[in-house]
Image: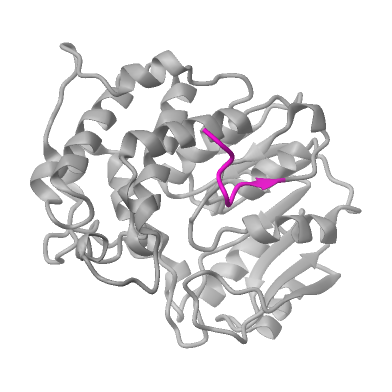
Amino acid sequence: MGKHANQIVQHSLFPELNIKFPSTRYQGSKQKILLWIWDQIKDIEFSTCLDAFSGTAVVGHYFKQMGKQVTCNDILRFNYNFASALVENSFVKLSDDETDWLFERHNDVDYQDFIQKNFQNIYFTDEENEWIDQTIANIYKLNQPYKFAIAFFALCQACIIKRPYNLFHRKNLYLRLADVDRSFGNKSTWDKPFDYWFRVFINEANGAIFDNGKKNIALNNDALTIEKKYDLIYIDTPYVSKNGIAVDYRHFYHFLEGLTFYYEWDKHIDRRYKHYCLKIIQNDWSDKNKIHNAFDKLFKHFRDSILIVSYRSDGIPSENELIDILKKYKSSVKVEHYGNYKYVLSKNSISQEILLIAS
């Protein structure tokens, strides 16, 4: 497989390893501005760091490349698996033979048809749903936890790349299948089979795995429950726009989260909605009336560490409000502006990516 178009080659303390973080279409990913983020903090002295809301783990992985001892944390289980595969894991890779095994049917595997029965005509074709049901069952038979995490990562990325808008927020398989002229999307990408994309992402994951000589960790916790033992905390929370609209990653990627509890998925589905999302879990980070207090509690909890906050200039809280909250706990707060960087699906051309550095 050739290098995927959106895969970024990064500066590293380990250039001889030719490390590349896998391509990603995850909403809110900092992959494209990663080098700018590092440039703002490269002169700060720190050895241990926590990526407290790690998402795809792209930031934590880069800190690992820069020789830091990294802990990645995310409340979502599928993101935890990403960090387990790419950051905590330093040696284990998935071989071609093991990948081939995942595509086969085996007598000792408990195959079910949950996705075929419940998600028909929602996200993928019948044939694709059958493939996902079989493959996730095989993945659950991988007893080595890092091999499981690598395969799970590849499955999730294959699911994302075959989705219009790369999300699971609507029942919209018809957008892929309609025989019409298109102003968005990439039909050739959508039409490539799952096993093709799965192999692409296995290879990309394998290419991102390396040892930096430190004990790196992946966690699946509420950030406020994590020990206060890190030199530096990188914070990239879910985002609430100035209009009070929240980015709810659990909703946008509920299908991937469901795969993490495949055999218990049925208990978590909210069948009132056509796209069969997960039942809502209340979250202060997606509530415009509670997010100020959420930031306050987070900054207070980690007040003894250097705080690095990725943010959007037009969010709730406002940039100035966020600075004021930081100043309650830190003596120095510096703000860097990237400029008019716009996420792929955003219609907001005014918002700026900013980095708050508090020490």
* Quadrant that contains the C terminus: bottom right
Give the residues in magenta.
Answer: 1-9
* Relative horizontal placement of residue 284, taking residue 215 as reference (left or right): left
The residue sitting at 79% across, 65% down in the picture is 357
* Relative horizontal placement of residue 249, taking residue 331 as reference (left or right): left
Residue 71 x %, y %: 64, 40
Residue 314 x %, y %: 60, 84
Establish if 127 lies above or below 104: below
* Relative horizontal placement of residue 64, taking residue 177 as reference (left or right): right
Residue 280 x %, y %: 27, 62
What kind of secondary structure does the magenta stretch mostly adopt? loop
* Relative horizontal placement of residue 195, taking residue 27 as reference (left or right): left
Q: Is residue 290 visible?
A: yes
The residue sitting at 48% across, 17% down in the picture is 95
Give whichever of 29, 104 is nearer the camera: 104
Give whichever of 79, 138 is nearer the camera: 138
